[in-house]
Image: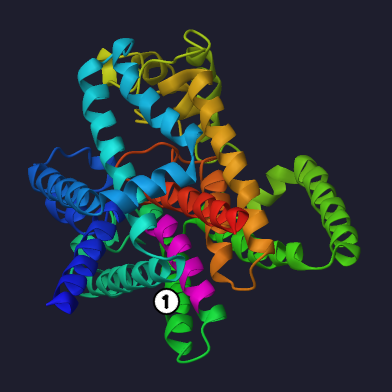
Amino acid sequence: MKKILIFAEQGFTIVALMMFSGAVLNVILSGGAGQQSLVEYDSSLIRIVFFFIYAVTFLLLVLRWKKTLYFLILSKDVWLYSLIILSAVSITWSFAPATTLKNSFTLISSSLFGVYFASRYSLKQQLHLLALNFGIIIILSFVFAVALPKYGIQTDIGSPKLRGVFMHKNGLGSRMVTSSIVFFILGYQTQRRSWIFWVGFSLSVLLLLLSTSTSSLINLLILILAFFAFQIWRWSYLVMVPTIIMMATIIQTFYFWFSNNSDLLFTSLGKDATLTGRTEIWPLVIDRIWKHPWLGYGYGGFWQGWDGESAYIWRIVGWVPSHPHNGYLALCLDLGLLGLGLFLLGYWRSYLQGFASMRRSKTALDIWPLIHMTYIALASTTESSLLESNSLNWMLYVAASLSVRMTHEIKVKS
């Protein structure tokens, strides 16, 4: 009976990870519509499934209330808790209170799943569950592309592009970055039957390339380099310090070269320097931020179409973005500089504790939280991937941050 319950719980976790990944249901319910189609579809099934996930998550946390309470207290992630509470409190000044109420509820609920994921499973178990989740997504993406091209191929952005089980090709690209890193770490760490993980890594990279998501490909290359660079932190100080100085010099040199040759680099990648219009809206967003700099417009209160503050930006740019394509700017719009400050303080503390924990360990698994936090920082420069409810990136950030803090506190006490 106990094995059946464990299997059922792991099955629930996989279903939840699939939903947070944004796979399958959205593209099917939309009838295979593309991003440019702006088709309205009945998403009640998605809401029902998420409500089921929230309810089961809450029940599982309550059933293990002693472990949950111990985990939350020991991790002491005050900045993260404060940021989530601020999003809920922002209903008092929100420009769209109903949206803020709904979004803050889903943010708290998806954050609770991050708490459950980190407190219930070890880092090794987390990565194996993620690998199983992405394995299913990879198989279904190929099936959709070959057998159901109406859903698996995106045709509304010029030449057809592979999107698999996602609404947009960039959704496939971003998820395959996380998938590639998960399989890479497991393949690097595992001794027996590691070929399974390397096959998963290869297929993830293949799907990423077929999605033609350039930013995701660049992020993946940076993360793989970061994986090996982070291990320098485990070396003796006599070797580590000169190596870090040399790497910092190389990075600074590349930065100066990039500053002077960015147009040439973007052209060679088939992109323009405005990142397909993203950078053009950033000054307009910053202008709106300074109208309400400290507390913002409330969580989800800015992008309300032609009836909200977003109309100012829509009129000027001539298209209808639903977010600023930058996580830091999105956070400032929602919760102002106070919200951004809370996030950065919590992020920086978790990042430093991640390095401290990694230095005391010898496994590749302990690098995972640092890798994901690095990915969050990278992805947020071109996408609004911070403080996003029902998002795999945010849920995993909560789990990674709490796992790092928990590991750090346990090692300090021991």
Residue 328 at x, y percent in the picture:
52, 31
Residue found at the far bottom of this picture:
192
Q: Residue at position x 83%, y 51% from top?
A: 248
Q: Is residue 42 left or right of residue 39?
A: left
**Residue type, mark 1 in image:** Leu
Q: Residue at position x 50%, y 52% from top?
A: 406
Q: Residue at position x 47%, y 78% from top?
A: 202
Relative to 218, is 182 above or below?
Answer: below
Q: Residue at position x 32%, y 14% from top?
A: 94
Nearest the viewer among 407 and 342 is 407
Look at mark 1 in the image and give the residue it sits on.
Answer: 203
Residue 170 at x, y percent in the picture:
40, 52
Q: Is residue 189 left or right of residue 157?
A: right
Locate the N terminus and report the quarter of the image it occupies. bottom left
Residue 150 at x, y percent in the picture:
19, 61
Nearest the viewer among 371 and 401 is 401
What's the magenta region? Answer: 172-186
Locate the C terminus and report the quarter of the image it occupies. bottom right
Considering the numbered disc 1 on the image, is that residue within a helix, a strand or a loop?
helix
Q: Is residue 36 left or right of residue 234?
A: left
Relative to 121, is 155 above or below?
Answer: above
Residue found at the far front of this picture:
414
**Displayed quadrant of residue 321:** top left
**Displayed quadrant of residue 60:** bottom left
Q: Is-magenta flag for residue 183?
A: yes
Q: Is residue 219 visible?
A: no
Q: Is-magenta flag for residue 77?
A: no
Disc 1: CA contacts within 10 A as few (<14), some (14-19) or many (>=20): many
Relative to 63, is 98 above or below?
Answer: above
Residue 240 at x, y percent in the picture:
84, 63
Total label count? 1
Secondary structure mainly formed by the magenta segment:
helix
